[in-house]
Amino acid sequence: MKTEVLIIGSGIAGCISALTIAEKGVEVTLLTQGDDLFTGNTRLAQGGIVYTGPEDTPKKLEKDIFTAGWNYNSIKAVRFLAKHGPIVLKKLLLEKYPIPFHEDDDGNYSLTREGGHAVPRILYCADHTGQTIMEILSKCVVDHPYIRVCTNRTAIDLITSHHHARGPEFMYSLTNKCLGAYVYNESRDVVETVLADQTVLATGGLGQIYLHTTNSTGSIGSGVAMANRAKARVINAEMVQFHPTAFYQGTRSRASRRFLISEAVRGEGAKLINSSGEAFMHRYDPRADLAPRDIVTRSILEEMLRTEEECVYLDAANHVKHDLTKRFPTIYGKCAENGIDITKQPIPVVPAAHYFCGGVLVDEKGRTTIERLYAVGECSCTGLHGGNRLASTSLLEGMLWGYSAGEEIGSKATKKNALSKKLLEAIPDWESPGNNSNEDPALIAQDWMFIRSVMWNYVGITRSTARLNRAIDDLQNLNRNLRSFYKRTPISRPIIDLFHGSQAALTVTVAALRNKDSIGCHYRAD
């Protein structure tokens, strides 16, 4: 298959990129792992998306982002988002693809506030903002004549000129170019060679390499693993943000994903309390329940250790003035399914792996260190978040960089900039690694449990040199075994995911050991 632009991933960043490029009359092929475009993390975003309020300015937003990020942020990225983010949001999500954000009685957009924000500036659709955005964007993508959506596809490897092009003239080239990807078609059980003039990684985060996470099942760090193998620069991989409030369903819960209790609940006034009904956040930070997420997460962990309890509680019933059934209908419904009436009872919560602040290094146009390869959304590292992400900036970042990359790619889509026929013909089709039918679901499940337990216990909320060294030994050994297994076994989605997940876990752990400073979400106990 040959396409002008290949986009791997279908969340807000991937969809905005696809639409922006396609609007310029450029052919786009968009890959999604599921039957539709609702497989990623965007649909799970509850709280909202940063905009701007009457008392707001770009400088105020910049200050809040720097404070939350422990001043470890890229100055250029922060200024780029603070200046252009609200403008592009208005252009795209209020005008071009209008999202029905909540309005007050006078018809003005309602703005809420979350932890780390100095003023209310967040647009929302009740507590299902991401789902609503995806419903509208996915329809626009599917209906667009220049976008071809390929479902049930899993990218295996990026195709690059240094690694895959056959012939001495390409071997001696200084510049490494991305030429597309090898893609597993689950419906037909074949590997497709998808060649592209420009390739965009929009694969999302990696929360599923942890035992407890709010992420979708496909969030295993595949984009980071593929980019790393292709020798693109990956930075800040140690910066994994844990959300302080995931719904706690007891120690016997086997859920693959923890249900998120949005930070917007605290933004509307809810208080964190312990099992004695005592509010405790004021003891850990003067901003109390609206402190940045890394601080709230560690405070909850300390409170659980102090009280020897398995969870803490979020009291919305006694502190939120809104009708909880209307302001937070999704949360109300999920809690009710599990016997908790949030209008009368506090919600049991625990921290869970949530957002990846590191990723594939990109500039303001989404360009990586490999020519013709872009990265947008959570798999990329723009430098915006620094040591810790400010609440509700993720959707805005995905939208803005998706748009910026789309504009850049669209402007380059000329015959002059297309890959040469000679280079494309030098790329071989995928060669099957082996024919031993030895894939065992029980062994794969055990390997995943091993990865997740190692990451949660040794590379989690609190880290130390001893824990990280132990994790590296364990993960390196697993990666060696998996490489050997991979070479002998026919390809499949579970094997690809396991291979990517194990490599992403090792990448995070190595970065965590190298960074000896406690910064934001990377907390070194020693």
Image: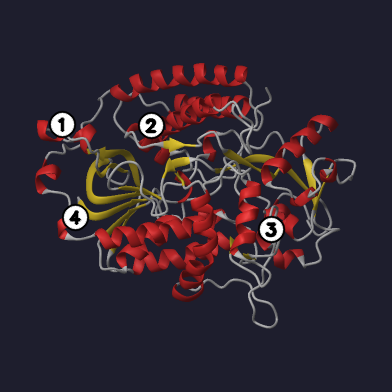
The label on residue 200 is none
**In the image, what residue occupies the spot 48% across and 42% down?**
219
First along the sequence among labels 4 and 1: 1
For the residues labelled 3 and 4, the Cα–Cα distance comes to 52 Å
Residue 294 drawn at (x, y percent): 67, 41
Q: Is residue 155 left or right of residue 121?
A: left
For the residues labelled 2 and 3, the Cα–Cα distance comes to 35 Å
| Closer mark to the observer between disc 2 and disc 4 | 4
The label on residue 172 is 1
Residue under label 3, please give it. 333
Between 211 and 240, which is closer to the camera in this rendering? 240
| Closer mark to the observer between disc 1 and disc 3 | 1
The amino acid at mark 3 is Gly
**In the image, what residue occupies the spot 38% across and 32% down?**
495
Residue 438 drawn at (x, y percent): 34, 23
Can residue 430 be seen in this snapshot?
no
Residue under label 4, please give it. 417
| Closer mark to the observer between disc 2 and disc 1 | 1
Residues at badges 4 and 1 in contact (C-beta under 8 Å)?
no
Q: Quadrant of residue 522?
A: top right
The amino acid at mark 1 is Tyr
Q: For the residue labelled by badge 4, is the local secondary structure a helix, a strand or a loop?
A: helix
Q: For the residue labelled by badge 2, is the local secondary structure a helix, a strand or a loop?
A: helix
First along the sequence among labels 1 and 3: 1
